Amino acid sequence: MALNLVKFPLEILLHICELLSHAHEPSLRCFALASKYCYAIASCLLFRTITFKITTPSKLQAHVRECTRLLQRDGAFHHVRRLVLVSGGFEHGNKWSKDGNANDEEDAELSNFDRWQLSPAPLNWDLHHQRLRGIPNHSDSACRGFAVRTPVHAAYDEDAKWAPLADLIRLLPALADLIYEWPTQFPPCLLQALHTKTCNHTTRLHLRSFNLRMLGERGLPPPKTITGDSHELDLITSPCLHAIWLADCDGRVAPQQEDDRTSIGRQLDTLEQIVRTEGLAPNLREVRLELTSEGTSPLPPRPYPSGWLPGEVGARSRKQQPVALEYLGLGCRYGFHQITGFQVQRWTELAELSGLQALELTAPVTECGLDTLLSLRFPDLTTLSFLSTRNPSMGYLNKVNRFLARLPRLESLRVMGWDWSIGPLAPDLTSTTTNGDDLSPACVKTLVTLWLDHRVDTLSPYSRSSVISPSEIARLGAFYPHVEILSIPIRRSKGDADEAARYKAIGASFPRLKRLALNLDASAPMRELTREGVSFEDKWVQPWGYTNRHIMDVMANSAVDDKLARQIFEAVALPGLETMMVRAEGGGDFKMPPDLPREWRGRWDYKPNITRFLRALAREWIIDTVNPRREVRIVKVGAEKWKWRPETQPWMMPSTNDFLEHFKRLWPDINLKSEDWYDQWKSWPLTGVTCTLEKDDA
């Protein structure tokens, strides 16, 4: 292979490497190993992103030394474009940051979490969705943005620990982005290292744990006079500051100030003032917010608080600077915060949004907020995430469709919490359009990625979060005809003809599909309280509103083996399909019946008992076509056996589990006392589909 590649022009080989780096990074590494010539070509991409997972000071210093040695050996300093600094784990990050010190003796314990690598950081995100979407693993799929509360002086006390990394930054002449997700304040030495590079070019700083410690402690009223911290002042006035992620944990009212609304969202109020004030964050282009449950209701318009920032900043001109955001994210970490019309309108006043390229709405958008969005224009928007409100009306869903049709350059769309029981996520092209909106497929001809999220936490008990009809799939394909990357929730029905028809409809409706993620909905349907029957299957399981038959159906629908995954791939039957992921979800999402008697509600949740079986049944599979001859490889994901401790969790063992009888009736020949009982079951086959692929597990 290496001898043939030498004959290609350098420009073609570089283009091949670029394609491999975006589509499948392991293939790029294999290409680099083919010969020294291939390695020399691929090295410019192999060293493009460097990630440090940080837990302890000694490990950080050791990994920086090793990274510097490798870059120096290959002369690759000028290849580095992106530097990612993340915590080796949420709890491990806190171990270093609580008191500003860490116990280096814990290095051996944290060795699996703390490393550096020549690639983006996977962290805790959905890696398979990221791979299918074709975006980097350190992308904005979920706002982390956590920041622990440390004293102002802690940044200076810990600064010496970051000095080796600052020295490395000075050796990277082409560094374009520094992504910081460590929960403590951004170190002063790193900021100084970035500023020394501005004579040649400006490195963009992405602060994904923004928090100003000089504003005081969380939950307490701000001090009457705020003494400005020199480092934090330099940080918010830095020309390098490009992106801010803020998880606002200050949204609570102090007990002594129950009527003082200005103490709500202290960090958010400060961020708003930074955005609108000339001279602060002059090159800010990305903002992402996550509010906590303290913002459960829409807040009335608040006057700008005075004195939040120290005099050094407050003395600046109060003219509003023309900040043109390229990315805006509004969400909620937990609680019931919603995106209202006031919140959307507020950001139209703070910044110029006409040039917005990405909009992430990961909190439920109210109808008033949707009306405000419809009144705006986003001609350059290419990426949109949208979370529907709870219990939407048909009119609300129609407005969502009109909003989507008004985005002429939309390339990637993620929709969460869609209630399919009310209406489909696509207008009916055969009906007459209203309100003068052009809802023809030409409006969305640019859409390439469509991600329909199987999210049930925002839906009502009687809502439907998955597709059950081939006509719904066909309607999606008619409105989004150019989709190449699709993630869609499909309702399982034990492999019957209706389920097979749904898979076939995907292949018939999306002819350009290259990557497909199927989230197989195995959840139990919402049922009214039933009476006890004679047979085991019809017996009512107290205190649930479900019969034993429903529970057995959940188990059967959760069971996905390699044969079923192959049959699904055959049913989709798309010649251009390169990658497909199949996994079962929702088996434990039993919904509490609204009319459940009060005395039963306290003992309704049996999820831990059924989880033992679902962990064994709900397998994940990835099917790849590995070469032009359409040879197929199937890989089991997450094959590690789930561990439990019999001495402390006896209820989790199959022999003592409440659902043992259900499992034995479905698979009577399995010996649950054997160590490999979770590998002996078989899925219900897909009706009318014959598997012709050869097994090639990895």
Image (cartoon, rainbow, N blue to C red):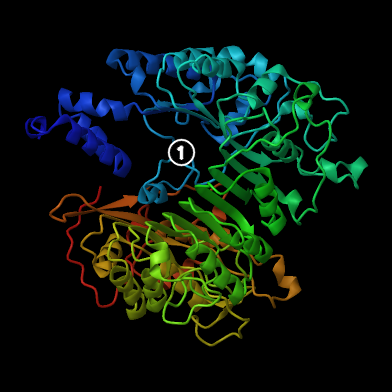
Residue occupying the point 53% across, 47% down: 356
**Looking at the picture, which amino acid does disc 1 mark?**
His
Q: Nearer the viewer, residue 297 or 467?
A: 297
In the picture, measured across the screen, residue 1 lies left or right of residue 115, that is left
In x, y percent, where is residue 683?
33, 67
Element at label 1:
loop
Residue occupying the point 72% across, 55% down: 342
Give the labeled residue for mark 1: 138
Image: 646 above or below 594? above
Q: Nearer the viewer, residue 604 or 181?
A: 181
* Residue 677 visible somewhere in the drawing: no
In x, y percent, where is residue 586?
50, 63
Task: Count all numbered tags in the image, as a single digit.
Answer: 1
In x, y percent, where is residue 235?
64, 24
In x, y percent, where is residue 125?
47, 45
In the picture, measured across the screen, residue 447 lies left or right of residue 185, that is left
Image: 241 above or below 74? below
Image: 382 above or below 452? above
